[in-house]
Image: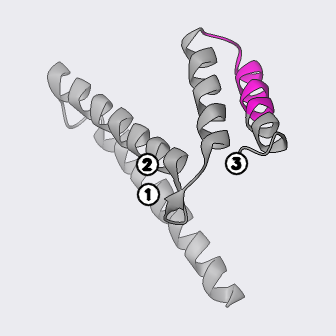
Amino acid sequence: MTQSVIAGIALLAIGTFAMRFAGYKLGERMPLSERARTLLADAAILLLLAVAATSTFYEAGRFAGYARLTGVGVALLLAWRKAPLIVVIIAAAVAAAGMRYAGIA
């Protein structure tokens, strides 16, 4: 089992490196319009947002709880207000931990 895990990690690492290297090499040879670049950037942001929203609301197929929602909400609010990253992380963790301590999971 350990060998298959190591092989999977190695395969992912090689594939990731190959994709990044190909993007670097082909980036100059494949000109894209400004609109196409904007659409690709928006698609990447939308994909990350969908993953973040899914992991915020669900864990193991069930509702993740109000404490997690509160922590993410605090983080979003502070990030929107352009707070330093360490402040965002600590405040979100404290908010979620405080709700769990209060018995609100």
Q: Name the residue beneath numbered marker 1.
A: 18
CA gap between label 3 and label 1 equals 42 Å
**What is the x, y in percent for residue 44?**
35, 38
Q: Nearer the viewer, residue 105 or 19?
A: 105
Q: Residue furthest front?
A: 103
Mark 1 and mark 2 residues within 8 Å of each other at the beta carbon:
yes
Residue under the point 71% across and 86% down: 2
Q: Tell which circle, 3 or 2, labels the residue nearer the N-terminal end.
A: 2
- Left or right, 60 with reference to 35: right
Which residue lies under the disc numbered 2?
A: 21
Residue occupying the point 67% across, 91% down:
1
Q: What residue type is labelled 3?
A: Ala
Badge 1, how many Cα within 10 Å: few under 14, some, many 20+? few
**Percent coordinates x, y for residue 27 in the rendering:** 30, 36
Binning the other alpha carbons within 10 Å of mark 2 as few (below 14), some (14 to 19) or many (20 upward) gives: few
Local crowd size for mark 3, using a 10 Å CA cut-off: few (<14), some (14–19), many (≥20): some
| Comparing labels 3 and 1, the label whose residue is closer to the camera | 3
Magenta segment: 82-95
Rounded to the nearest angstrom, the CA distance separating label 1 from label 2 is: 5 Å
Magenta stretch: residue 5 in it?
A: no
Q: Can residue 80 be seen in this view?
A: yes
- Colour mode of the rendering: one colour
The residue tagged 3 is 105
Q: In this view, does 64 lie to the left or right of 96?
A: left
- Rendering quarter of residue 30: top left
Q: Distance between the residues labelled 3 and 2?
A: 44 Å
Determine the residue located farthest toward the bottom in the rendered image.
1
Q: Which residue is drawn at 63% across and 32% down?
A: 70
